[in-house]
Image (cartoon, grey):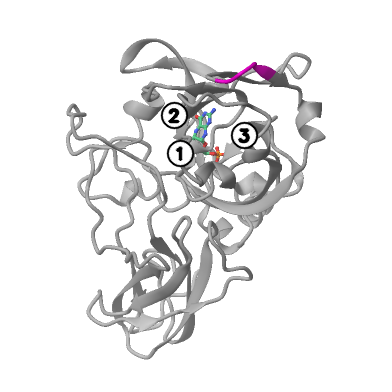
Amino acid sequence: MSEFTQLETRLDRPGLIPRQLQPENLESPLNTLFSWQTPTDLFYLRNHLPYPTIDMDTWNLQIDGEVAGSKSYSYDDLYNMPHVSKFVTIECSGNKRGLLEPPALGEQWNIGAIGNAKWTGVPLSYLLDQFEISALAREVVFKGCDYGSRPDMPGQFHFERSLPLDSNLLDECIIALWMNDEPLPYKHGYPARLIVPGWYGMAHVKWLNKLTFTQDKFRGPFQAIDYVYIDNEDDFSKAVPVTEIKVNSIITWPAKGEVIKPGVHTIRGIAWAGKARITEVEISLDNGISWSNARLTSPEHSSYTWTFWEYTWTVSFPGHYFLTVRAKDSFGDVQPKQARWNAKGYANNSHHRVEVTVPGIPAPSLQ
Ligand SMILES: Nc1nc2c(c(=O)[nH]1)N[C@H]1C(S)=C(S)[C@@H](COP(=O)(O)O)O[C@H]1N2
Ligand SMILES: [Mo]
């Protein structure tokens, strides 16, 4: 194969962008963000620990803790239960961390630690209804099969997270066995993962094998040390947990630094807001001084999924332009110009801005 053909093949079929190789953390490339439903093989991957080994002869989903009679379910048991499907956008809370000023600790994600997929599986409430849960239980802890060490403390830890029992949230959750109508891929949590619509990615525990009802507030490191908003790296006294996705938007075309011709262009992008629906997306062509409405163009426009938008831009004059986007949601939340900075760099929903150049003289042709 000639060098040229290889290059063409690569451009034709982009791959995920590595941010860290061990454990594997890969970002979706920009052009993936043009599909409302993210193709499974281009959906970003976020892992804290080495991939687990799953033995399907012994794997099961155990349910125990503050409950009358613990039980475990095989894959076949879950397969034969009633199923629901939901489109849910999952965003890593570290998405857009790489755009923060000053920089914050963690993977320097650009704008592609996000994807929208169809998740199918057992409604969590169906499973919970099989149990007599003790009145003392306050939380349910979801445990992943993956485990390993952490740089900040001795010992081995599983990826585990809890959710409160006293909310309607659990009624929305799914124990997903399928992603985009195919069995859940191994790297996305096969055989079963939790889907928590409207919450940032860390809540959607992959490779599930246990649910435990507890009285105490769960304090595992992926709950109490990671995924909290703190101002200062070593002060957890005012830590606030990261939970629901905040209203946010990005420009997906043109890309940062692009050189474009004078004429009529369609600026494109995405907006999302967790449980709330996007009600308005505005564009500024003058670095945030004046704003105009963009058109919302998604095939579906519902809670829990992102919304596509576009804006027709007629540009007549050469120059440097700052294009900025901001969104509003049905809960009345407005995307802030500048998100509140936090030491771990979570939930950056600052206005997204890209600078583009419209050259005054023809750009030299590339031979
Ligand atoms: N078991 C397990 N579940 C996990 C994680 C993990 O490291 N281990 N990472 C979480 C985080 S932070 C995110 S953003 C999402 C990413 O899901 P994906 O890799 O399928 O895109 O999975 C979540 N669930
Ligand atoms: Mo994440």
Which dot, 3 or 2, sits closer to the camera? 2
The residue singled out by tag 2 in the image is 138
Which amino acid does the dot numbered 1 rest on? Asp
Q: Earlier in the sequence, mark 3 or mark 2?
A: 2
Disc 1 CB within 8 Å of nearest ligand 1 atom: no
The magenta segment = 67-71
Are the two marked residues, 3 and 1, in contact with CB atoms closer than 8 angstroms?
no
Residue 62 colored in magenta in the image: no
Are the two marked residues, 2 and 1, in contact with CB atoms closer than 8 angstroms?
yes
Residue at 48 percent across and 42 percent down: it is 201
Disc 3 CB within 8 Å of nearest ligand 1 atom: yes
Residue at 64 percent across and 16 percent down: it is 70
Vertical placement of residue 222 versus 265, above or below: above
Which amino acid does the dot numbered 3 rest on? Arg
Q: Give residue 301's position: percent from left, percent from top.
A: 57, 68
Vertical placement of residue 198 versus 291, above or below: above
Q: Give residue 349's position: percent from left, percent from top.
A: 33, 56
Which image quarter: residue 166?
top left
